[in-house]
Image (cartoon, rainbow, N blue to C red):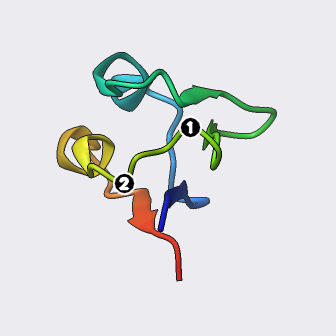
Amino acid sequence: MAHIINDQCISCGACEGECPVNAISEGENHYVIDQELCIDCGTCAGVCPVEAPKPQD
């Protein structure tokens, strides 16, 4: 199961540099996670100041 970034994202970019598989990039309205690349490690959630990355339901 991969993570997703919800609308709480403030586009600070903290998660992008921490992703070990480079699955995070800047999207149109906020950062997004490439579901094909995400290994569900949770590193992005650990560095996000607003807790925007969440495990996908």
The structure residue drawn at horizontal position 32% and vertical position 58%, both measured from the top left corner, is: 51
x, y (%) of residue 45? 28, 51
Q: Is residue 20 above or below residue 10?
A: above
State the mark number for residue 54.
none
Q: CA distance from mark 2 to mark 1?
A: 9 Å
What residue do we see at 42% from left, 25% from top?
21
Judging by the rendered image, the residue that carries numbered circle 2 is 40
**From this viewpoint, which residue is outermost toward the top?**
17
Q: Quadrant of residue 37?
A: top right
**Amino acid bearing label 2:** Asp
Would residue 48 be found to the left or right of residue 28 on screen?
A: left
Secondary element type, mark 2:
loop
Residue that protrudes farthest toward the left in the picture: 46
Decide: is 19 above or below 56: above
Query: Which residue is under mark 1?
Result: 37
At 61% from the left and 59% from the top, the residue drawn is 7
Who's the residue at 53% across and 32% down the image? 11
